[in-house]
Image (cartoon, helix red, strand yellow):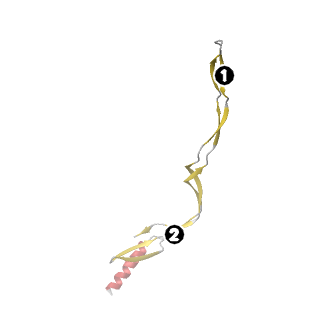
Amino acid sequence: MKTAFSSLVLGALLLVSAPAGAQGVYASYYSGRVVRGYATSRVWIPASCETVERRVWVPGCSERVWVEPVFELRIGPCGERFRVLVAAGYWRTLHHAGHYELRPVRVEVPGHWEARGCRY
């Protein structure tokens, strides 16, 4: 009778000490010891958007660069000096390689249930 009464009182105390949103009181046995606690209710988290950093491939680009013409100073047979065009100017196309970089990306997180506050 004493054992049944003490178990009843212990159960009542556990029910009273649990918060209003608790789903249930439980007792678990772990290596011979009794561990008592409660799990609180779950809460619905609505869908939302978050900004996270992701590795993104940035493709390479092309760039046109003007290469200046090359002139040289020459001396003629009579000692006169004059400039001679050795290489004409031209446009050169430079190709830059692609690379990865971290960029902020908006991601939609679907709605989900989340457990709030477990006590053991």
Of the pair 19 and 113, the residue shown nearer to us: 113
- Vertical comparison of 50 with 69: above or below: below
Q: Secondary structure at mark 2?
A: strand
- Vertical comparison of 84 with 80: above or below: below
Of the pair 31 and 116, the residue shown nearer to us: 31
The amino acid beneath tag 2 is: Arg
Nearest to the eye among marks 1 and 2: give it: 1
Q: Position of residue 7 (x, y in %)?
A: 36, 81
Residue matched to label 2: 42
Query: Residue drawn 32% across and 85% down?
Result: 2
- Picture quadrant where residue 85 is located: top right
- Picture quadrant where residue 6 is located: bottom left
Of the pair 107 and 55, the residue shown nearer to us: 55
- Picture quadrant where residue 63 is located: top right
Of the pair 34 and 105, the residue shown nearer to us: 105
The amino acid beneath tag 1 is: Val
Q: Quadrant of the N terminus?
A: bottom left
Q: Position of residue 119 (x, y in %)?
A: 41, 69
Query: Residue drawn 58% across and 53% down?
Result: 105
Alpha carbon distance from label 1 to label 2:
86 Å
Q: Which mark is residue 84?
A: 1
